[in-house]
Image: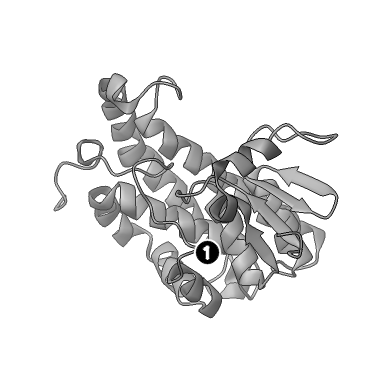
C-alpha cells in the first residue's frame, strides 16, 4: 500500500462520492490504491479525524504527508496536477465551479431518499421522500442538467462537445458519473428529460468510451450502484409513467 503514490480512503462496496475521485485517478493514469476496497471499512474509519487538519468524512486522499478531503477539492487538485484542465486561472476556476455544481446535485439526489434525517432508515421517511423525489425529478433534474446543456452550447471553442475550451477536462468525468447515477436511480424520469439535453447525453457516451474509463468500469475495482449508496433506485420515487 505504501508503494502507491496516491491513497484513496472511501467506503468499500459503494460508488458514492469516492467514485468521482476514482474516475479522475483512473483517467490520469495515476499510481493509486483504493484503501477501503483492499483493507476494508475500518481502514477508512481509522483515517477520519487524524492529522493536523482532520477530515470530516471520506473521501480522503493521502499524498505523502498531505491529507485532503471533500470530493470536489480532491478532484480539482488531481485534475490540475495531471493536466486535465487548461492552465489559465479562469478555466481552473470554472472547472471547480462545474465540479461543485455536480456536488450540489449529488447532495439533492441523496436527499430524495433521506429527506428528513440521514440517520433514519428510508422506511421511516417514505412519505417525505416521495414528495422530495417528485420535486427533484420534475424541477431539479431538468434545471441542473439543462444548465450543463447550456454550458456545452455556449462553449463555441469546443463545438458543443466540451465544458471548457477545445478539449476534455476533469469535470466532465463528474457530469458523466452524475448522469449514470440518475439513470440508475430515476430511469423513467431520465427517459423523459434526456431528449432535451442531447449534448449532455452525448458527453456521457463519449466519457464512457474513453479507454481508461471503459477499462476501469469493466474491472472489479469499479463498485456498482446499489441500495446503500447516494443513488438508489426505489421505483416509487421515480416517474410513474415512462411514456410521458
Q: Which residue in the rendered view is the most extreme toward the bottom?
A: 211
Local crowd size for mark 1, using a 10 Å CA cut-off: few (<14), some (14–19), many (≥20): many
> Which of the two residues, 21 or 166, is positioned nearer the viewer here?
21
Can residue 149 be seen at all in this image of the molecule? no
Image height of 143 relative to 161, above or below: above
Can residue 65 be seen at all in this image of the molecule? yes
* Residue drawn at point x = 62 percent, y = 36 percent: 45
Task: Classify residue 83 as left or right of residue 25.
Answer: right
- Residue 158: image quadrant is bottom right
> Which of the two residues, 14 or 211, is positioned nearer the viewer here?
14
Secondary structure type for disc 1: helix
* Residue drawn at point x = 30 percent, y = 39 percent: 138
Image height of 142 relative to 87, above or below: above
Estimate the x, y position of residue 179 in percent, counting from the top left: 41, 56
> Which of the two residues, 57 or 134, is positioned nearer the viewer here?
57
Count of picture labels: 1
Tell me the residue that label 1 is attached to.
152
- Residue 224: image quadrant is bottom left
* Residue drawn at point x = 50 percent, y = 37 percent: 107
Looking at the rendering, in which quadrant would you find the N terminus?
bottom right
Estimate the x, y position of residue 86 in percent, counting from the top left: 74, 68
Image height of 77 relative to 68, above or below: below
* Residue drawn at point x = 32 percent, y = 27 percent: 122
Estimate the x, y position of residue 104 in percent, counting from the top left: 54, 40
Estimate the x, y position of residue 101 in percent, counting from the top left: 57, 45
Amino acid at each position: 500500500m505504501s508503494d502507491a503514490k496516491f491513497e484513496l480512503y472511501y467506503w468499500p462496496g459503494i460508488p458514492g462520492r469516492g467514485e468521482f475521485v476514482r474516475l479522475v485517478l483512473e483517467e490520469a493514469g495515476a499510481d493509486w490504491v483504493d484503501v477501503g476496497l483492499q483493507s476494508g471499512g475500518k481502514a477508512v474509519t481509522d483515517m477520519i479525524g487524524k492529522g493536523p487538519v482532520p477530515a470530516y468524512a471520506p473521501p480522503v486522499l493521502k499524498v505523502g504527508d498531505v491529507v485532503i478531503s471533500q470530493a470536489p477539492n480532491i478532484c480539482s487538485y488531481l485534475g490540475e496536477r495531471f493536466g486535465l484542465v487548461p492552465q489559465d486561472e479562469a478555466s481552473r476556476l470554472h472547472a471547480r465551479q462545474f465540479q461543485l455544481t455536480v456536488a450540489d446535485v449529488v447532495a439533492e439526489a441523496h436527499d430524495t431518499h433521506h429527506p428528513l434525517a440521514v440517520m433514519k432508515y428510508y422506511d421511516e421517511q417514505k412519505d417525505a421522500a416521495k414528495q422530495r423525489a417528485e420535486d427533484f425529478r420534475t424541477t431539479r433534474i431538468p434545471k441542473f442538467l439543462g444548465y450543463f446543456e447550456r454550458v456545452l452550447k455556449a462553449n463555441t471553442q469546443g463545438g458543443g462537445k466540451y465544458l471548457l475550451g477545445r478539449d476534455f477536462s476533469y469535470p466532465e468525468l463528474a457530469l458523466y458519473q452524475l448522469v449514470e447515477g440518475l439513470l440508475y436511480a430515476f430511469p423513467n424520469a431520465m427517459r423523459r428529460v434526456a431528449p432535451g439535453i442531447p449534448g449532455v447525453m452525448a458527453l456521457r457516451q463519449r466519457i464512457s468510451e474513453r479507454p481508461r474509463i471503459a477499462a476501469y468500469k469493466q474491472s472489479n475495482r469499479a463498485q456498482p450502484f446499489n441500495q446503500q449508496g447516494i443513488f438508489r433506485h426505489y421505483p416509487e420515487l421515480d416517474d410513474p409513467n415512462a411514456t410521458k
